[in-house]
Image: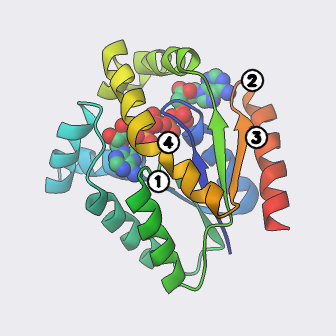
């Protein structure tokens, strides 16, 4: 199995690159952002609770996202592997993921981190906000809060995988296809 974590701040290109990676490597795409937005669209109780937090640029509680991932892993037991996009976003989420994967006799092969500066991230998210309809992309103050939440709670997840020798960083600024080629290089090295 090939299990990858695609990591980076909001707007780094995780969703964009995941779409290309699932086709190249035949992986199942697990985006907690997409899963939460689909709960919101269906009007579930979980979705209503998540929307309140997401609209304020705050992370959703660990147990909620871990529960969603657990459910998806169970549903896709015969998959060739997974790409985790926007998850894990905290160290407790990373620990829970290791534990869940070990139940299936597998583990994370690599974390690929997309490095993009905050000025470029803000520009991309505001641009997406013009067409996406996503409330969290609509104004600069909310984007600043998402970046603060990322710096405080999510950045330490890179250290977690780095200690396991699984961390690889690449420049996330440039043409989408060039960045994709760099990611593939790292994956091929990790997959040996
Ligand atoms: P996410 O849906 O994960 O949203 P995101 O961080 O904005 O990243 P996304 O993948 O969508 O953007 P991308 O970089 O591809 O999370 C949304 C919210 O959900 C969070 O704030 C949180 O509240 C909650 N949540 C999700 N997961 C959670 C978890 N595990 N725990 C707790 N809470 C959780 O793209 C951005 C834009 O850049 C796009 O418009 C794209 O076209 C553009 N772009 C991409 N690559 C580019 C390039 N190379 N050059 C120029 N533009 C580029």
Disc nearest the viewer among 3 and 1: 1
* Cβ at disc 1 under 8 Å from ligand 1: yes
On screen, residue 155 above or below 96 = above
Mark linked to residue 87: 1
Residue 118 is left or right of residue 45, and the answer is right
Q: Dot 4 surroundings within 10 Å: few (below 14), some, or many (20 or more)?
A: some
On screen, residue 81 above or below 4 = below
* N-term mark: 2 or 1: 1
User: What separation in Å lies between label 2 and label 4 (alpha carbons)?
Assistant: 22 Å
Name the residue tied to disc 2: 174
Residue 163 is left or right of residue 151, and the answer is right
Q: Dot 3 surroundings within 10 Å: few (below 14), some, or many (20 or more)?
A: some
Name the residue tied to disc 3: 180
- Looking at the image, which is closer to me, 149 or 7? 149
Q: Dot 2 surroundings within 10 Å: few (below 14), some, or many (20 or more)?
A: few
User: What separation in Å lies between label 2 and label 3 (alpha carbons)?
Assistant: 10 Å
User: What separation in Å lies between label 3 and label 1 (alpha carbons)?
Assistant: 19 Å
Name the residue tied to disc 4: 155
């Amino acid at each position: 199995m090939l299990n990858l974590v695609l990591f980076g701040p909001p707007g780094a290109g995780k969703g964009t690159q995941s779409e290309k990676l699932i086709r190249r490597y035949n992986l199942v795409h697990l985006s907690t952002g997409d899963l939460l937005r689909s709960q919101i669209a269906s009007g579930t109780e979980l979705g209503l609770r998540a929307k309140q937090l997401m609209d304020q640029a705050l992370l959703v509680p660990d147990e909620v996202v871990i529960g969603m991932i657990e459910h998806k892993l169970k549903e896709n037991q015969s998959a060739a592997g997974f790409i985790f996009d926007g998850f894990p976003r905290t160290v407790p989420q990373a620990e829970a993921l290791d534990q869940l994967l070990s139940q299936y006799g597998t583990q994370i092969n690599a974390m690929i981190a997309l490095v993009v500066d905050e000025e470029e991230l803000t520009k991309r998210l505001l641009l997406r906000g013009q067409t996406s309809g996503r409330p969290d992309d609509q104004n600069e103050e909310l984007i600043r809060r998402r970046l603060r939440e990322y710096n405080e709670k999510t950045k330490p997840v890179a250290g977690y995988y780095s200690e396991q020798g699984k961390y690889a960083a690449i420049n996330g600024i440039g043409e989408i296809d060039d960045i994709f080629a760099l990611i593939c290089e790292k994956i091929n090295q990790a997959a040996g």
